[in-house]
Image (tube, helix red, strand yellow):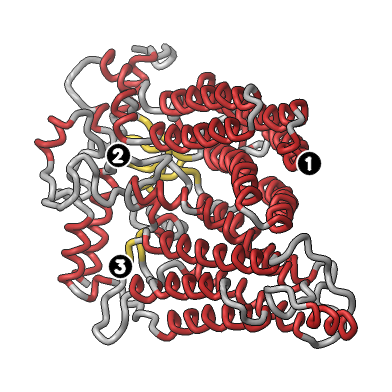
Amino acid sequence: MHSSEKKSPKENTKNALKHLHPLKHPELHHEGGADDHTEAAQKISSREMRAEEGKDEDSDFVEKYGPVKFKWIDPPESAKKRYMIIKPYALNYYHNGVLYRTRGERGSSVFELFFDLLYVGIIANLAESCIEHSDGKSLAKYVLLFFPCWQIWGDMRCFMDYYYNNDIIQKTYVVWIMSLLVTYANNAQTTDENDKQLFGLVVACYMLARFSFATIVLLYNLLYIKEHRRQMVGYCIFVYCSVIMAGFVILPKAMYKKIIILCCLYFWDIVSYAISFSPWFKRFIRSEFHTALNIEHEIKRHSAFVTIALGEFLYVIVAHSPATSGLNERTARAICSLIIAYCLSWFYFMGEGSKKAVHAIRRHAMFSVCWIQLHFPLIISLVIAADAAGELTRSGYDFPMNHAETVVKRATSEGPSLELPRDNYIRDVEIFFGAGIFVALVAMTGIALLDKGLDKEVLWKFTPKVRILPRIMFGGIIFGMAFSDMKITLFLGLSALFLTIQLLFENVEEVDGSFVHEDTDVVKNVINNYDVFDSTEDEQPAQYNSSEEKSHDYEHKETDEDPEIEQEQQGSIESDFASDGGSNASLKQHLQENAAK
């Protein structure tokens, strides 16, 4: 063949395949002609063929939440040149047990932070109405109205995590969703007035927001993104079904029937979300590629929302100057509320306290589900407790029960007291505050326990899990005190004191941060718990297409868990429900190398 002659596409593909490592792409190295190689090469995207090894000086943040085998991929040229409209692409995905992701640690983008600012007002609006009435009906209304906002926020988080490229289409999408949320929040409080038009408007805003999310994700995957295609198409079908179900909320006239439909709808959303990214669903659709969650982005987005909820504590103690007239009891109440918010913030961000740990998202499917879902009751309870603390700070009463002589004294010395909507209103607010703190501490403890600590156990110190369990005890005590007849200032002061004691206890009893490789026996236990492969990372195939092939290449460790549940996988609810061979092998090699040192 002369040099001027052009080679056929098959010959070019065959020559290109020679440079691919057989262990990294075993599906491309088998006996067969050029046709077989060309067909196999079509399964590998051009971005993946140009992927670089992920182990470099910039990769520490990827393994911060647990070891995982990964490679870097580059965005398309349109994204690098920052065109007005950028071709959609997957920021991260899994293929053959290897995580392919774009370079750089991701945080919350400017548009995501701007989007979160809207939720500051939504949370304050819904919670204020709940505390104003402080009864079971107002609480149920608050939860039912806040869940759609939480669901829309989750859709936006999911979309930005998978496909964020900051082009004009996505900017328009963000503004559109925010417009729907503004309309929703301004009319949500009127849903109990039996005004069919207003109620229909509120439901329509939710339906349009979810329909828009499903449509843009479906178009992205059908037209451009093959790595997520099968999985996300299935999830979009579930979302469309949810949108149709939401329309039935308008039909019944009785409010209790509407509530029943809403509860069924929310249950459907939670279950369909878990099913769409479960291992058996991936096996059912025979998906070779599957979605991968950007773990640091996911954690930071949830942390940002928790920060918004905690910020409600600070807003209510300074907005409208509830503690005026110098140093007095209301000033003490405001300071106690500040200390409570500080302790709660420390509890959440400190987690279970281990220096080295495998995050719940990267640990196991069930832990991933629980980690994500526990944030909903956490945020609900934090906001309720915050607004209740603000109401207690503003109150002109000394005691939760109505004492006329106390009101007159406070009114003359510190300004006019607030008019109460009913008798025993302050007592109900205290109960809401105590219940909110208790539920928040239970949720925070549950979230922290989902991580798997890898620190060496020290005989004379409590383990991280034992250290955080008293949070629940103190939360129960605070909830119980809400039924007593003690002074409001004393109630808030004792609540702040108990949380401060727990905070000091966790810091004093902090376990030595030595990594588990200092103890060989601990290393072996961790390896066994992770159900890792017997072969090394470079020796074992990255993924298996059937359970029969899988059984010939490795053997399972004996565990007490259900064999259908893969042990300690390296993935997330949205990315890796199935066991990740490359990640497990990477974990084993990582621990054994550290043990050898």
- Does 504 sit left or right of 49 as displayed? right
Label 3 neighbour load within 10 Å: few <14, some 14-19, many 20+: many
- What x and y, as percent, mark residue 55? 38, 54
| Residue found at x 73% / y 80% | 398
| Residue found at x 45% / y 35% | 273
**Mark 3 against mark 1, which lies toward the viewer?**
1
Mark 1: which amino acid?
Asn
Q: Which residue is mark 1?
A: 186
Give the quadrant of residue 453.
bottom left
- What x and y, as percent, mark residue 50? 42, 36
- Does 352 sit left or right of 479 as displayed? left
Mark 1 or mark 3, which is nearer the start of the sequence?
Answer: 1
Dot label at residue 261: none
Question: Which element type, helix, strand or loop, lies under badge 1?
Answer: helix
- What x and y, as percent, mark residue 371? 43, 52
Dot label at residue 578: 2
Is residue 426 something one can see in this rendering?
yes
Instruction: Name the one closer to the observer, 164 or 567.
Output: 567
Which part of the image, by quadrant, shows the N terminus?
top left
Instruction: Name the one closer to the observer, 34 or 449.
Output: 449
